[in-house]
Image: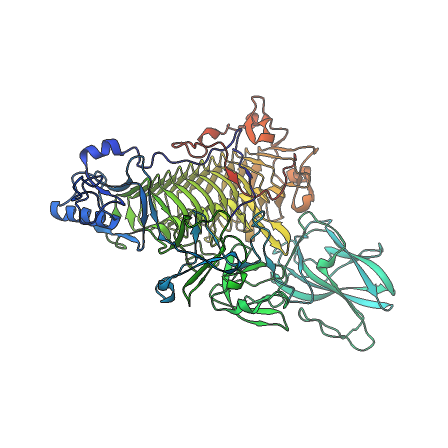
């Protein structure tokens, strides 16, 4: 897939050098290590009947290397069985070439090494062995419409299937509708769920004092009309016991504002109710009405109604008819002709919020979509727009336009405007790079891209794991097994995969279960279906110096495992299957004492680095994270989620550079964005966030949701589009947080310093000694929509000793945020950030530029 790209800018002065982050394939350990070790060899020219003790066949053809890794593994087992515990290291060297893996390579506790005598499977020095998780296909024949095809008997027999295909080392696209738009694959090439309610879409994020929307309406007859609103609200604010009553108003034709009463919280932001809120006298003819937020506070609006029938009482999204001679004027909230609202957003309203119905016009829906293997890939909005669902079609109703969905991933309520596409339809095979596998006939059909020949490499996956390394749970681990300098590519993935809904995945191309002291180093993972490396349980393993590219899931996944190190890796273009994943993920309460450092992570569907209910004393430091969250919303470049309201992690997020976190979603073709550079979500508590640089994030640089005792100090937050920080105090749970000695700098006119609310007090978060500067502004604004002056903010006890002044960056136009010697930050105790430590350091990269993700918005200087 050709991507819409731009250069990826290095965090501070210069261009980020990413590609080629590995050292020589064989690893530098070989020259010395082989002097005092047992060595076996594997070669594509080998023979499993030979001894494996020679690097190449002898001249008589009677001895030489093994042909398979499995045979070498068995030789190591035999060595240990005959000689007892290892007294020297054992090394298996793979010669260059392609090794096609048809079954996972399985290792158990019996294949372990020791700390002084590890067992290593490595590339022969300066050669490139490739372990390919599939079969090479040849013999394609031309068919009609420019396609080629090949019959696979194993598929027809039901013993083989696959959902990925790779041609010339590039992932191809299962036949779909609409086709991918190569120029903008994230935002174009979708269908959109239609409005299933006559009331239209939801207008939200209108919580700022001064927000308003204006409408045109026609009044059929004079009289007194009851004004109704169909709304949802859950402000959960002790100072708003009456909810939104008398906080908003109605104005007709620039007349006297009418306060709107009877607007209590409804119990949820998606719990919509009708309420009669005012009475207004109207005259016949055309009028202009304006709804306006006067005092601030949130609600979501779907519709208004003016009715002069005293008996009319609406209940749901399908209002009943009025009595004869009476009149009902229904106004959709999303049909405004003018508006003011810095955060105003229109999103889909699903009526009854069905998770199993999605709308498609009959002139678009095709009978071929009812085939059993057809899938819908839906970017839902009912669960924070955080994940994509893959479901199948049960039926279609041409009268209601409803597609009836089925499958275990029918999880989130679907709203109008949710984007989706239809995949795996033979009749949609019409674009170069698309393919379709008929499981009944075994015929693989492919529409070649230009340049395809009979010599092109076509790989159909046979496995999802290549190395399956499993100790005995709770008993005997696999220990000191090393993989070094290997290339692993072209593996498959499957539905579910631990990634349904909010699942983060559960497997890897290299899967280490109950492993201790194992190492994956200097390897390349390319075009894989699952995470490159998954570590389940165990402890003290290491993933270092690897390149992970074009993963169907994420990069490295650590599940309830402690003391591991993930360092000096280059992880990019992840999430080409499921979307809710990350470059590096730590998950589970036993995931403690892990270090994630010096990685370069970019171009991901969701997180750069994520800690999901992780344990204690993890360290996330000196990583470069850029162009993340390209396909999901409500997210962060570095993100922490914690369910325990009182747990203090004692973990550190230090010295990272986080830039261009997008947080993309849409309602129809209208984009919406929500992402933070560093996102301490839910009740994440006890984190030390220090020495980080974030810039150009869609929502803000830092988000403090509802945790306790987080310390955010000595960071640089630059040019986030909505706010530089969000201080939430979710459900009044936060206490003891600190936000001090940071630099906040932005040039976006409408962006505010902090978004916050009345639940935030100095007892919740201590905010002081920050250096603050908005280019071109006399002072910053605070609060949702900037409703609070900086002086009022200080009067509440915040930023009393902070300074409003230019921090004097070296060259902010080039993302060089080094401080000049005369910067006022130093008088506040700010310590310079050493950017030379950020990103891979042991294996500096060899190229000058790296293609990066889409530019969703222009820079302010452009």
Seen from this angle, which residue lies furthest top?
Answer: 821
Horizontal relation, residue 550 to residue 395: left or right: left
Check the image and report above or below for 73 versus 311.
above
Q: Quadrant of the C terminus?
A: top right
Horizontal relation, residue 351 to residue 428: left or right: right
Check the image and report above or below for 590 versus 123.
below
Is residue 735 among what the camera can see?
no
Check the image and report above or below for 399 versus 730.
below
Find residue 398 and report its image quarter.
Answer: bottom right
Is residue 50 among what the camera can see?
yes
Q: Residue at x 19, y 46 (%)?
A: 76
Horizontal relation, residue 308 to residue 375: left or right: right
Q: Nearer the viewer, residue 302 or 4?
A: 4
Q: Nearer the viewer, residue 342 or 103?
A: 103
> Whole-percent x and y of residue 319?
71, 71
Seen from this angle, which residue lies furthest bottom?
Answer: 324
> Whole-percent x and y of residue 65?
21, 43
Horizontal relation, residue 192 to residue 8: left or right: right
């Amino acid at each position: 897939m050709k991507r819409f790209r731009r250069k990826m800018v290095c965090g501070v002065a210069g261009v980020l050098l990413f590609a080629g982050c590995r050292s020589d394939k064989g690893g530098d350990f070989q020259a010395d290590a082989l002097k005092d070790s047992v060595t076996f060899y594997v070669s594509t020219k080998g023979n499993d009947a030979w001894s494996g003790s020679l690097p190449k066949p002898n001249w008589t053809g009677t001895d030489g290397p093994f042909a398979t890794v499995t045979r070498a593994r068995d030789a190591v087992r035999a060595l240990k069985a005959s000689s007892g515990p290892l007294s020297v290291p054992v090394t298996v060297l793979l010669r260059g070439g392609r090794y096609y893996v048809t079954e996972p390579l399985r290792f158990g506790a019996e294949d372990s090494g020791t700390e002084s005598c590890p067992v290593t499977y490595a590339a022969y020095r300066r050669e490139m062995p490739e372990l390919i998780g599939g079969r090479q296909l040849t013999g394609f024949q031309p068919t009609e419409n420019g396609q080629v095809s090949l019959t696979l008997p194993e598929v027809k027999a039901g013993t083989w299937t696959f959902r990925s295909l790779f041609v010339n080392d590039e992932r191809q696209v299962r036949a779909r509708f609409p086709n991918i738009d190569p120029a903008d694959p994230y935002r174009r090439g979708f269908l959109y769920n239609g409005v299933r309610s006559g009331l239209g879409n939801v207008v939200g994020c209108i919580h700022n004092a001064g927000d308003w929307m204006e409408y045109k309406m026609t009044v059929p007859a004079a009289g007194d009309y009851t004004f109704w609103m169909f709304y949802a609200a859950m402000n959960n604010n002790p100072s708003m016991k009456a909810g939104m009553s008398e906080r908003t108003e109605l104005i007709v034709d620039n007349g006297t504002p009418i306060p709107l009463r009877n607007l209590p919280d409804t119990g949820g932001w998606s719990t919509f109710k009708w309420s009669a809120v005012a009475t207004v006298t109207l005259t016949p003819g055309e009028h202009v009405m304006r709804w306006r937020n006067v005092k601030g506070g949130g609600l979501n609006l779907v519709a208004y109604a003016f009715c002069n029938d005293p008996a009319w009482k609406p209940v749901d999204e399908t209002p009943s008819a009025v009595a004869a001679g009476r009149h009902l004027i229904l106004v959709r909230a999303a049909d405004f002709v003018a508006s003011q609202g810095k955060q105003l957003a229109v999103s889909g309203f699903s009526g009854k919020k069905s998770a199993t119905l999605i709308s498609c016009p009959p002139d678009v829906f095709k009978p071929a979509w009812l085939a059993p293997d057809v899938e819908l890939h839906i970017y839902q909005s009912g669960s924070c727009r955080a994940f994509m669902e893959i479901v199948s079609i049960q039926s279609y109703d041409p009268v209601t336009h409803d597609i009836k969905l089925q499958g275990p991933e029918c999880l989130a309520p679907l709203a109008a405007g949710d984007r989706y596409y239809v995949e795996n339809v033979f009749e949609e095979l019409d674009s170069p790079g698309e393919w379709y596998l008929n499981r009944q006939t075994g015929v693989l059909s492919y529409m070649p891209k230009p340049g395809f020949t009979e010599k092109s490499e076509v790989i159909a996956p046979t496995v999802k794991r290549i190395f399956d390394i499993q100790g005995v749970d709770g008993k005997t681990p696999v220990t000191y097994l090393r993989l070094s300098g290997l290339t692993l590519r072209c593996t498959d993935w499957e539905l579910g995969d631990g990634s349904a809904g909010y699942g983060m995945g559960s497997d890897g191309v290299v899967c280490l279960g109950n492993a201790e002291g194992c190492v994956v180093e200097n390897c390349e993972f390319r075009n894989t279906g699952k995470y490159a490396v998954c570590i389940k349980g165990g402890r003290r393993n290491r993933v270092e110096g690897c390149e992970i590219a074009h993963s169907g899931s994420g990069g490295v996944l650590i599940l309830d495992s402690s003391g591991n190190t993930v360092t000096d890796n280059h992880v990019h273009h992840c999430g080409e299957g499921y979307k809710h994943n990350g470059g590096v993920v730590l998950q589970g309460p036993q995931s403690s004492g892990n270090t994630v450092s010096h990685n370069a992570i970019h171009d991901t569907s969701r997180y750069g680095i994520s800690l999901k209910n992780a344990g204690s004393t993890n360290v996330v430091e000196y990583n470069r994270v850029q162009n993340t969250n390209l396909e999901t919303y409500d997210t962060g470049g570095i993100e922490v989620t914690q369910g325990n309201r009182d747990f203090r992690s004692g973990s550190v997020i230090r010295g990272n550079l986080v830039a261009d976190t997008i947080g993309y979603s849409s309602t129809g073709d209208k984009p919406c964005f929500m992402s933070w550079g560093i996102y301490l979500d839910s009740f994440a508590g006890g984190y030390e966030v220090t020495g980080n640089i974030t810039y150009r994030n869609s929502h803000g640089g830092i988000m403090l949701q509802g945790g306790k005792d987080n310390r955010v100090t000595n960071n640089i937050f630059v040019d986030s589009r909505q706010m530089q920080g969000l201080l939430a105090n979710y459900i009044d749970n936060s206490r003891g947080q600190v936000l001090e000695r940071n630099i906040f700098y932005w040039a976006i006119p409408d962006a505010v310093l902090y978004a916050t609310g009345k639940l935030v007090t100095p007892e919740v978060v201590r905010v002081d000694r920050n250096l603050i500067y908005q280019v071109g502004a006399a002072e910053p604004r605070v609060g949702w929509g900037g409703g609070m002056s900086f002086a009022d903010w200080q009067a509440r006890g915040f930023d009393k000793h902070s300074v409003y002044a230019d921090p004097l960056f070296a060259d902010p136009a080039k993302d060089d945020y080094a401080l000049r010697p005369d910067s006022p930050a130093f008088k506040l105790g700010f310590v310079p950030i050493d950017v030379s430590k950020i990103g891979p350091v042991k294996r500096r990269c060899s190229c000058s530029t790296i293609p990066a993700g889409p530019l969703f918005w222009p820079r302010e200087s452009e």
